[in-house]
Amino acid sequence: MMKSSIAKLTLGAIGVAGLCAGCASNPASAPSTAPQKSESGWIQPSPVLRQQIEDEAERLPWTHGFERLEQIRWFASVGEPGYDTLLRLASDPRDDVAASALAALGATLDKRLVQAIHDLQWTPERLQGDLVLERARALVRLGDWGQIPELIAGLEDERVYTRSLCLEALTDATRETHDFDPRADEDTRKRAVDRWKRWWDARAGDSLLSRRS
């Protein structure tokens, strides 16, 4: 049930990513005076915005469906003043909370977040399964194509939702589909996945691609 909820949540999050592309110009993240920065280097919110961020972070574990998607959209629209909170939430032990934070970080399209996401301290157990795919989706959206193999592997998942999510993230980043249909029969999907793998193998040595672990 939890894995299905994360998958459905992320499907909506991908859909709102385009709405968040201009978040850097949001008035809430553009104070008129010189902004204060945290120890991590991110711009800090004003006192009023800080309280709003804290309130939304406290509510996040208890929201569902469209309300949760609206929170992801809101966090992404806040931009840099919300990064410290989102990165903290991305380490939350509850997978759905961490997945929501990663979705919001990816939706900002701020490439400076790539290193910060890589620096998150996760247990070995968390470096498997759906949350890893959510992390890969966020990183690929932020420009880290080194995570593409994770998404290609996700095309072989037994769940159609997960296959659809991985394909959408891959297509958004690369403008390729290789005729992969998440609902096709297993043999047809396998042939398409093989095409994706060959496509990646032909590009994996490109020095312009980020090759991070």
Image (cartoon, rainbow, N blue to C red):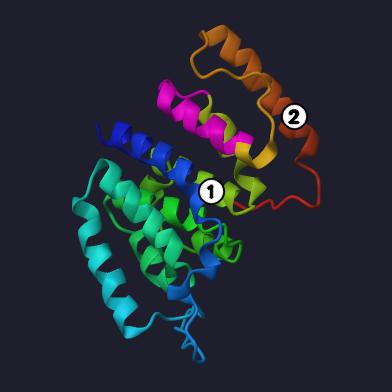
- The three-letter code of the residue at mark 2 reads Trp
Q: In the figure, 67 relative to 164: above or below?
A: below
Secondary structure character of the magenta stretch overall: helix
Q: Residue furthest bottom?
A: 33
For residue 82, side relative to residue 54 (left or right): right
Answer whether labels 1 and 2 touch (C-beta < 8 Å): no
Rendering coords of residue 156 (x, y %) = 51, 23
In the rendered image, which residue does mark 2 sit on? 199
Total numbered labels? 2
Q: Position of residue 24 (x, y in %)?
A: 54, 68
Tell me which amino acid carries mark 1: Gly
**Viewer-proximal residue among 164 and 119:** 164
Instruction: Give the residue drawn at x 57%, y 57%.
Output: 109
Report the quarter where the N terminus lies: top left
**Extent of the magenta region:** 156-171
Q: Residue at x 61, y 20 (%)?
A: 180
Q: Residue at x 72, y 34 (%)?
A: 200
Q: Is residue 138 left or right of residue 212?
A: left
**How far from the left and from the top, in percent, is residue 12?**
40, 40
Horizontally, residue 27 falls left or right of residue 151, namely left
Please tell me in which quadrant of the rendered image residue 192 appears: top right
Residue 18's label in the rendered image is 1
- Does 158 appear in magenta? yes
**Could you say whether the residue bearing mark 1 is in a helix, strand or loop?**
helix
Q: Nearer the viewer, mark 1 or mark 2?
A: 1
